[in-house]
Image (cartoon, rainbow, N blue to C red):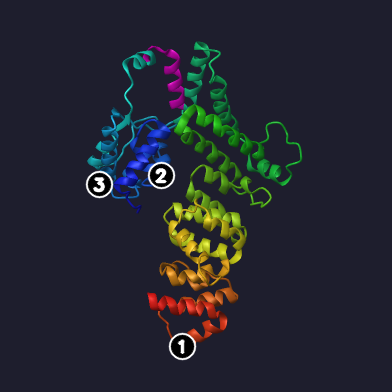
Amino acid sequence: MSTLPDRISLTAQVDRLLLEQGRLEPLELLLTLDLLAYEDYEAWRSGGRADLQGALLADPDEVAAVLQLAASHASGQGLQPSQMEYRGWGGHNSPLNLGANQRLIQACAEAFAPAEDRLQLDLFHDSTGLLIENGLRDALAARRIDDARDRVGELMRHDPRHASLQGYLRLIQAVDDGSDDDDNDAVEANLANPEKPQPSGTFDAADRLAQLDALESTARDLLGHRARDFLTGLWAGLAEKLAGIDYNPASPRLHASHAWLRAERWDAVRSAIEQEPNWRWHPDLVVLHAEAAWRRRDPISARQDWAWLCWEHPHHAEPLLVAATLPDSRLCELWSTFEDMDTALEVEEFPAWLLLHDRSAAAAVPPDRAPDDERGALYSVLHRLVSGEGNIELRRQLDDMHPAMLRLFLASCQTG
């Protein structure tokens, strides 16, 4: 389960959402606070979940209390409430079920936004073009593409020179381009020989990747924060076309795992990686697998991946461990301590050192996960020592292998 934010952290997140999105919506806040995974939210919107309550990563009553506190903060800043309606995406355009918890239902019922003055409101309601454009944005974000086509047709008739018209047409074209019926044999042939000209109508994975990369700024300019809802569906479509295509280190982004990453489908990321028979020997895949495991509340698998990176891909592990983007903040703190020690150790020795400073490491990474060499032998002896087998013979073995690590072990016994 996720950790609930304290009041200071919560108000900071609310203020950030207001700055970025111009309004506070309950479910956007839950996504930001990591109390709701995007792939579960998307499944609910798309008809794959009966309710939202079962997908929450904390107790529904506690989630409702967080939302009520956020609403109180927004209201205290003069923001005005407006009723929320939750409907499905795509062909599931019907009211959605939040769940049975009445406190949760009530807490999700309203969004908050700055009040518009009377003149702005009148001008808004008098502008046919703005109404059409708002409907078009909603249709694209909700993946109702036929509706979006109708709306863009209305916009063309109303204002053929509308400044954003070409951008909206690009978004719709991207959906159409991704829905062509191409088999995976064509994709595989294209990836195996990218220099060979492809027949007209053949799916080109590299071209599609470039198209989606280039589309992101247009989508964000036109749809704001709801660009994610539009784009993730397109990335999922690319991932499905790349299914079964072997990983190629020369073009790592042309693997299904990368497209699933962009679609924020972490379970699918793991599945695509684990289908590669030698994935642990590709550091990019190990890093991505670790992040996917962490995002789906599997810290043990994530720690095993990060330990493997240190052992087998130390040059990739070091920049990762100092990066602010590493999701395991505790691991980042421990790495900082490791680097600041007077006793200099190698990156490959970090998993063993962790056993002395984070006792959960022993349970997360058992000795059989270590390499079958001197690094694994060191880890195994130290693992036995921190697990309670504190006999003299093990200490002698550790002293023979790594005297500095024995001194660190003895020091940890005194401070622990």
Residue identifier under label 3: 61
Percent x, y for residue 150?
49, 19
Which quadrant, please, contains the C terminus?
A: bottom left
- Amino acid type, residue under disc 1 in the picture: Ile
- Amino acid type, residue under disc 3 in the picture: Asp
- Residue 147 or 396: which is nearer the viewer? 396
- Could you tell me which residue is drawn at 52 percent across and 72 percent down? 368
User: Element under label 2?
Assistant: helix
Which quadrant, please, contains the N terminus?
A: bottom left
Q: Which residue ends up furthest to the left in the rendered image?
A: 102
Residue identifier under label 2: 40
Query: How far is disc 1 from disc 3 in space, using C-alphas?
Result: 53 Å
From the viewer's perspective, is residue 201 above or below residue 153? below
Between circles 1 and 3, the one closer to the viewer is: 1
Residue 160 visible in the shown view: yes
**Dot 2 and dot 1 residues touching (CB under 8 Å):** no
User: Element under label 3?
Assistant: helix
- Could you tell me which residue is drawn at 25 percent across and 44 percent down? 65
Magenta stretch: dominant SS? helix
User: Residue 135 lies in magenta, yes or no?
Assistant: yes
Between circles 2 and 1, the one closer to the viewer is: 1
Badge 1 or badge 3: first in the primary sequence? 3
From the viewer's perspective, is residue 120 above or below residue 415? above
Stretch of the chain drawn in magenta: 125-139
Query: How far is disc 2 from disc 3 in space, using C-alphas?
Result: 19 Å
- Could you tell me which residue is drawn at 47 percent across and 58 percent down? 332
Q: Residues within 10 Å of mark 3 (few under 14, many from 20)?
A: some
From the viewer's perspective, is residue 153 above or below residue 60? above
